[in-house]
Image (cartoon, rainbow, N blue to C red):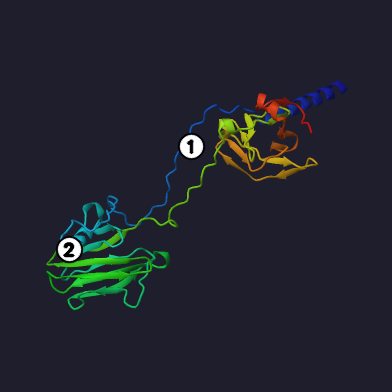
Amino acid sequence: MKSLTYAIFATAFAITLAGCATNRTPQFSYDASVPPLPTVQAAATDNTPRPLHVPPAWTVARGGIAAGTPTGRVENANAAARVEPRREGYYNAIQIFPWSEGALYQVYAAVGQITTIALEPGESLTGAGPIAAGDTARWIIGDTESGSGANRRVHILVKPTRPDISTNLVVTTDRRTYMIELRARESLYMPAVAWAYPATPGQRRAVPAAPIIPAEAARNYRYALQVQGDSPPWRPVSVFDDGRRVYVVFPAGIVQGEMPPIFVLGANGEPQIVNSRIHQNVLIVDRLFGAAELRLGSGNRQQVVRIVRTNPTQAAAEPASTTTGGSSS
């Protein structure tokens, strides 16, 4: 009976051990090369009107063709500053002019038709008389708005009372001054006009600068690695500093796993959080240290790699010496 009980106990113990072995997380080595992540297209759509082709930039006129008389110079300068509608600037029936300070934009209107001149979203009329026309008797001019909040947009509405007339229009806003020349035709007209504006410094998307990894000649190899227990697949391949920061280089395949956090060891060996950031497969620590630990996992399965500063002359000869076993103080 005792032998039967012992056999049952031994079998159960063996099954327990087998279960523990089965539940143990397997280790694997990272690949030497890793394919780039696929580019994910944004699902959101931008309904802001854009030209079929980006309108070519307007070349600033410098007075036009030389003339021998003052009146000739004025005529040539005005002619050179006139911006006519171009096929490249159309978005459906909207003519989108490239914005240029001081240009004379040509707008064609027709009897019985309304032409809308749209300002930039968020732009507001300013001054006591923000819309001024040379001929207010034969041109009907008004303004309205569309949208709300940041999408609020001012529209100037113009309509001639007869064909074959022309005048000029000056519009002042909180951002710029528009100079427009209106020309009336019998039936040909431009339904809508808008502008493409150069991006201001505040509108330009800020692109964070990539950290500069020091060149080989500027690297100080004065840190050694000490691995506790088995060598983990994320074990750094090298550690160096540039006199201000420490760079911990992991295998290129670290993206297939998890990069461990780093803790700087204080005077009494206590772990301290330190400012750091990641650039590709390099962990950049924003200050030098005497010792630090990379830790991943918890409990008795925690993997630890200690980084210890060594003598500079030794580090120069052995860039990333490795000691397997317990950590040393």
Q: Amino acid at mark 2?
A: Glu
User: Where the C terminus falls, by quadrant?
Assistant: top right
Viewer-proximal residue, 245 or 45?
Answer: 245
State the residue at coordinates (52%, 28%): 33
Label ID, residue 37: 1
1 and 2 marks in contact (CB < 8 Å): no
Outermost residue, top side? 3
Q: Pinpoint residue 273: horizontal percent, then vertical percent.
A: 70, 45
Disc number lying in front (1 or 2): 2
Outermost residue, right side? 2
Q: Pinpoint residue 254: horizontal percent, then vertical percent.
A: 58, 33
Viewer-proximal residue, 191 or 160?
Answer: 160
Q: Amino acid at mark 1?
A: Leu
Q: Pinpoint residue 144: horizontal percent, then vertical percent.
A: 31, 72
Task: Count neighbours of disc 1 (C-alpha within 10 A) and say few if under 14, some if 14 to 19, many if 20 or more.
Answer: few
Residue with the mark numbered 2:
75
Left or right: where does residue 75 sit relative to residue 14? left
Q: Is residue 89 visible?
A: yes
Q: Secondary structure at mark 1?
A: loop
Specify which label sits upstream in the sequence, 1 or 2. 1
Left or right: where does residue 145 sit relative to residue 23? left
User: Where the N terminus falls, by quadrant?
Assistant: top right
Q: Pinpoint residue 162: horizontal percent, then vertical percent.
A: 13, 73
State the residue at coordinates (84%, 23%): 6
Q: Secondary structure at mark 2?
A: helix
Left or right: where does residue 123 sit relative to residue 291? left
